[in-house]
Amino acid sequence: MKLYFKEAAWEEMKEVADIYNEFLISLRDITLDQYFDFEDLSLEERTKLLQERLENDRGQVILVRDGDKADEIIAFISFSIINCFLVVSSVKEIGYIDGAYVKKGYRNMGLLKKLDEIAVNELKKSGISYLELNTIASNKMANDAWSKLGYKVFRQQWRKDISE
């Protein structure tokens, strides 16, 4: 297996949007939550939103491609620099992982660990001291994976449906 890691280029964003969709579908399937219903957006619209997020939030997407399968994207991590949620904190900016995904068949090979290491190193170059992410409470696989990488729960995010 010939795997390689690289930063996504602008011209690769449609491919990134495609695997990002696979990631979101997996979340929707785990949660059965309409929050992850994005099917009304075209691939072009999703691509544009990802590009804008990366541009506006000083973000990066790191890809893992399988050279044995026509350079198919098999994993990614998307991260950016955002303002700290607590406006009075001495910490002004943090790193934030807004998506990470490894396709079935490539899991438990250390790909997420390597992607996390790359993200950490890139963010440290920008002077960032903290890296945060959110997971779905019921997503045991994700929660276990991030815990093994040294992440700890330090706050909880709650949600209330007020649409009615």
Image (cartoon, helix red, strand yellow):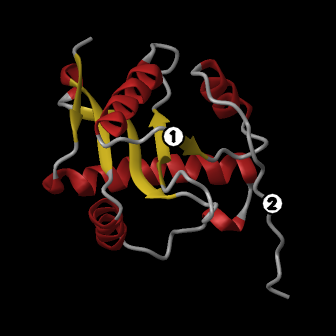
Q: Nearer the viewer, mark 1 or mark 2?
A: 1
Look at the numbered disc 2 and give the secondary structure of its residue.
loop
Q: Indicate the quadrant containing the C terminus: top left, top right, bottom left or bottom right.
A: bottom right
- Give the crowd class for mark 2: few <14, some 14-19, many >=20 residues within 10 Å: few
Give the labeled residue for mark 2.
158
Q: Quadrant of residue 47?
A: bottom left
What secondary structure is found at the residue carrying circle 1? strand
For the point 62% across and 29% down, which residue is it?
Answer: 151
Categorize mark 1 by other alpha carbons within 10 Å: few (<14), some (14-19), many (20+). some
Residue positioned 36% across, 64% down in the render: 53
User: Which amino acid type is marked by label 1?
Assistant: Leu
Q: Is residue 70 left or right of residue 43?
A: left
Q: Do labels 1 and 2 touch, CB within 8 Å? A: no
**Which residue is depicted at the point 60% across and 65% down?**
87
Relative image position of residue 8 (x, y in whole percent): 22, 44
Residue 57, placed above or below residue 62: below
Q: Position of residue 81 (x, y in %)?
A: 40, 53
For disc 1, the marked residue is 131
Task: Tell me where residue 6 sits by quadrant.
Answer: top left
Marker disc for residue 141: none
The type of residue carrying mark 2 is Trp
Q: Which residue corresponds to the image point at 61% horizontal and 22% vertical from the top-left?
A: 150
Viewer-proximal residue among 14 and 143: 143
Residue at the farthest bottom position? 164
Picture quarter containing residue 7? top left
For marks 1 and 2 on the same chain, the one whose residue lies earlier in the sequence: 1
Q: CA distance from mark 1 to mark 2?
A: 20 Å
- Work out whether residue 89 or residue 130 is closer to the camera in this orientation and state it: 89
> Dividing the image into 4 quarters, which one contains the N terminus?
top left
Q: Is residue 86 above or below residue 52?
A: above
- Image spot of residue 79 (x, y percent): 40, 47
